Amino acid sequence: MITVPRGLVLFLAGLFSAYHVVLGIYSIDLPRTPGPTIFALALYALATALSLWPSSPMRMGLALAFFNVAVCVVIPLLVGSQLDGSARNGYATWYVAAVGTLMTITATRRRTTLAWVGVGALVVHTIIWAGPAQLLDMGVIGSVVWVTVAVLLARALAKAGRDARQYALAEREATEWQAAQEAHLFERQMRLAQTLRLAAPMLRHIIDRHGELDADDRQECRYLEAAVRDEIRGRKLLNDAVREQVMAARRRGAIVTLLDEGTIDDLDGTELEAVLDQLAAAIGESTADTIIARTAGEGSATAVTVVGLSSADARLSALGQDSPEPEVDLWLEIPRDPATASALGV
């Protein structure tokens, strides 16, 4: 996209406005009273300087816009009071182009309604002071055209800016959607590959046995089903060490549940491996009957919470007493920061 430096635009606008000031000074007729014309020139120069101030925002302040309109009303009255509306005044009607220029700047800076008011005041003054026939001769129509073009350009540029922002937003959303789809595809492929690696030997064994499995084979299928479920629900809670310890715990009769809520997706590399190694060690050292490992909530300093529950003593039920709730055999909070884990001796 080709852009024009703002400084260059302001310089050209200032140069064009200064040209009207030069014409106004040149047209001062000393036999007449120069005071009103000089005051009009000073007002115009002040309004132009404020309107083209380099550090001003793109949208003109409302107070400045009203000031510009007031200047456009006052200047024709001041200068016109020293001229004869029925005669050809030449460069003495410099204020017509000056008003058009000032209102063009106002319209460009997104105060289109007030720009129409300012140039409309010029039209009304000219009709009353010199008659409708002078609208073309004095260049009033040209000033109206300038403002019209400025308004149309301002609206077109504003629409182009909105469209560009919408296209950028749509492109960003499309890129994010594509990245998410690719991530989901990669995740599915990885999970399928892992599932195939786990289940392929047993599937071949089932084929070789023509579907006739003994008790040990059926139990092994249950272990494999639980391992496949871990790949779906456990996601980032799994590495080779965790898989090995989970399978060992299940083989000794424990119930192991892994739940990944997606709150450790930002962990990667050594940080994630440190968390998973601590999780594997906790599962391997626990003698609990039920082990639950779950990622902590969003914004927590804890990465994974591990809970181990032991069943109540069966002898209490034999004596006719109510069985108590399962006892907590293991409670471990694995922090996200490996340095914190080392300091706590985890």
Image (tube, rainbow, N blue to C red):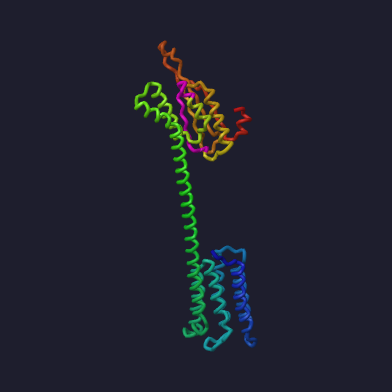
The answer to whether residue 132 is above or below residue 62 is: below
User: On the rendered structure, is 189 left or right of 28?
Assistant: left
Towards the viewer: 81 or 6: 6
Towards the viewer: 167 or 235: 235
Q: Which residues are magenta?
A: 248-264
Q: Is residue 338 visible?
A: yes
Q: Position of residue 242 (x, y in %)?
A: 52, 29
Quarter of the image with the N terminus is bottom right
Quarter of the image with the C terminus is top right
The answer to whether residue 6 is above or below residue 17 is: above
Q: Is residue 326 visible?
A: no
- Residue 276 falls within the magenta-colored stretch: no
The answer to whether residue 106 is above or below residue 243 is: below
Which residue is outermost to the front?
Answer: 208
User: On the rendered structure, is 326 left or right of 68?
Assistant: left
The answer to whether residue 54 is above or below residue 248 is: below
Towards the viewer: 304 or 228: 228
Q: Quadrant of residue 188?
A: top left
Which residue is outermost to the top?
Answer: 319
Mark count: 0
Q: Position of residue 4 (x, y in %)?
A: 58, 67
Q: Position of residue 6 (x, y in %)?
A: 59, 66
